[in-house]
């Protein structure tokens, strides 16, 4: 077989010059197509435009609108994957995301909670059951998932809720009845609750006055004050309690819908 | 292909065997330029090359997901990737003979990257001449030359990708180079 001559070598150099960079769009198209990166899109929400990220496992995060590079960098840091602006809204999820954001409930929307601890998943699943327009204390979430002592841990899971607005951590309030912190700021928490017709001022004033559970003198059932059953109690029948133990001592039983627990 | 490349591929294969989703991005990042450039020299058109590169990587991803970790660990990455790419190129050629491919996918984003430094070394008339000469080569010779010098594959890797003996691959490369050399001499005179 012949060896390479000088002309061959210059041909080889020219051929090697034929290699160049792939188009910038190739990497995102491949990673989104394979489903190993997330795509994101802008959506309207009760607190303004938000970024919603998704992948084949479901919706992975919701974040306030910001500089997209900063958002992408924080996403990769947190989730260990890349994220790219999606060219089109996710086909099946699109309308589900819109309605989930407007009511603050995931219902049948698939969500991607991979990488979270079992405890965190339990907290988020429980929180997602709190109906629109109602609030529950951190201690209630802790009791419901069988970890009554873990209310601080519940608080830290909710403080880093990957799916705020969809998993309504804004409906979880301090165990003394005050509104408390929110990952998007306490002011937005009040705004969201007010938008769901929760009377935030009344709620806090009652909490300060030690009115944390509301019972009916008719039925002898007591509730969280925002429970849909509590809202139907006529003013003359209202009986307030500072603790579940006081209500039980007075011969009341806990509502089976909102399930107040001993704090 | 250099030893450094081979070492990088061997490390990548171990990471793929551990966690495909995390390592796959690195696979795309480290192979996309050569794969795209090579496919582009095989099919000519940059939009189509981007489309076929995308198909190749997504097929590679699906294949990796279906392999056992021990099989992934034994992969000779570059040759394997190119065997997928050559299948994609061939099946595109077959389907294109029936109906033109819809390749709008990356088209709008290609325009700004299709004339980057790579081709600035050659003026466009020269580039067209080389492209035409490459296209005139028999498929086996063209494939072998593109994989060798644009894809930077070793003869063994080309043999694996094309499923042909190493000796045949070597002679394809040398015959192709001989043809290009005589064409170049003819052009100069």
Image (cartoon, coloured by chain):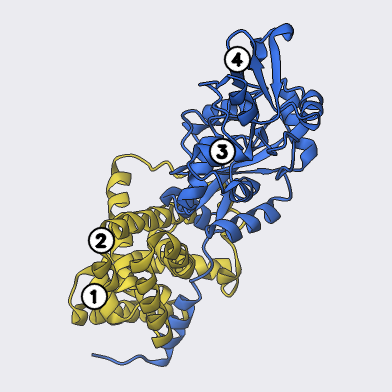
| Disc 3: which residue | A141
Q: Nearer the viewer, mark 4 or mark 2?
A: 4
Residue B166 location in percent, x, y? 21, 80
Q: CA distance from mark 3 to mark 2?
A: 42 Å
Query: Is disc 2 in contact with disc 1, using a CB cutoff of under 8 Å?
Result: no
Residues packed near mark 4 inside 10 Å, few (<14), some (14 to 19) or many (20 plus): some
Query: Is disc 1 in contact with disc 3, using a CB cutoff of under 8 Å?
Result: no
In the image, the chain rendered in yellow is: B
Q: CA distance from mark 3 to mark 4?
A: 19 Å
Q: Secondary structure at mark 3?
A: helix
Residue shown at the point (32%, 54%) measured from the top left: B62
Residues packed near mark 3 inside 10 Å, few (<14), some (14 to 19) or many (20 plus): many
Q: Nearer the viewer, mark 4 or mark 1?
A: 4
Give the camera-side residue of A161 and A71. A161
Q: Secondary structure at mark 2?
A: loop
Give the camera-side residue of A235 and A42. A235
| Disc 2: which residue | B67
In the image, taking residue B22 as reference, residue A185 lies left or right, namely right
Which quadrant of the rendered structure holds the C terminus of chain A?
Answer: top right
Q: CA distance from mark 2 to mark 1?
A: 22 Å
**Chain A image colour:** blue
Kindly identify which chain the residue marked by label 1 belongs to: B
Which quadrant of the rendered structure holds the N terminus of chain A?
Answer: bottom left
Q: Is residue B136 above or below residue A100?
A: below
Q: Is residue A21 above or below residue B1?
A: above
| Disc 4: which residue | A229
Q: Earlier in the sequence, mark 3 or mark 4?
A: 3
Residue shown at the point (44%, 56%) measured from the top left: B49
Q: Is residue A89 visible?
A: no
| Disc 1: which residue | B159
Q: CA distance from mark 4 to mark 1?
A: 75 Å
Residues packed near mark 1 inside 10 Å, few (<14), some (14 to 19) or many (20 plus): many
């Amino acid at each position: 077989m012949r060896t390479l001559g000088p002309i061959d070598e210059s041909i080889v150099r020219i051929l090697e010059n034929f290699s160049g960079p792939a188009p910038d769009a190739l990497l995102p198209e491949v990673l989104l197509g394979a489903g190993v990166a997330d795509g994101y899109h802008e959506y309207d929400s009760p607190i303004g435009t938000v970024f919603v990220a998704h992948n084949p496992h479901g919706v992975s995060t919701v974040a306030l609108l910001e500089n997209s590079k900063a958002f992408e960098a924080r996403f990769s840091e947190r989730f260990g994957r890349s994220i790219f602006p999606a060219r089109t809204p996710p086909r099946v999820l699109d309308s589900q995301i819109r309605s989930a954001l407007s009511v603050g409930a995931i219902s049948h929307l698939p969500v991607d909670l991979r990488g979270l601890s079992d405890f965190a998943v339990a907290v988020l699943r429980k929180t997602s059951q709190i109906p629109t327009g109602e609030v529950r204390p951190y201690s209630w979430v802790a009791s419901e998932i069988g970890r009554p002592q873990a209310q601080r841990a519940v608080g830290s899971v909710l403080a880093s809720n990957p799916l705020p607005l969809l998993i309504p951590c804004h409906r979880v309030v301090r165990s003394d009845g005050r509104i408390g912190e929110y990952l998007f700021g306490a002011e937005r928490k009040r705004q969201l609750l007010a938008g769901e017709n929760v009377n935030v001022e009344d709620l806090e004033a009652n909490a300060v006055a030690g009115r944390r559970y509301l019972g009916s003198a008719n039925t002898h059932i007591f509730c969280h004050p925002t429970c849909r059953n509590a809202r139907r109690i006529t003013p003359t029948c209202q009986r307030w309690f500072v603790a579940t133990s006081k209500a039980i001592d007075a011969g009341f039983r806990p509502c089976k819908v909102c399930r107040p627990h001993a704090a | 292909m250099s030893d450094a490349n081979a070492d990088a591929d061997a490390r990548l294969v171990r990471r793929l065997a551990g966690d495909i989703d995390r390592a796959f991005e690195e696979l795309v990042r480290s192979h996309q330029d050569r794969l795209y450039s090579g496919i582009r020299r095989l099919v000519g058109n940059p939009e189509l090359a981007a489309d076929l590169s995308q198909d190749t990587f997504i097929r590679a991803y699906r294949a990796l997901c279906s392999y056992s970790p021990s099989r992934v660990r034994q992969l000779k990455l570059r040759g394997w990737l190119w065997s997928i790419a050559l299948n994609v190129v061939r099946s595109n050629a077959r389907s294109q003979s029936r109906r033109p491919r819809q390749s709008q996918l990356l088209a709008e984003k290609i325009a700004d990257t299709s004339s980057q430094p790579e081709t600035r070394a050659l003026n466009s008339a020269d580039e067209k001449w080389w492209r035409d000469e490459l296209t005139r080569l028999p498929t086996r010779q063209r494939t072998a030359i593109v994989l060798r010098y644009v894809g930077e594959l070793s003869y063994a890797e080309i043999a694996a990708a094309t499923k042909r003996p190493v000796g045949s691959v070597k002679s394809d490369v040398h015959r192709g180079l001989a043809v290009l050399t005589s064409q170049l001499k003819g052009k100069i005179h």
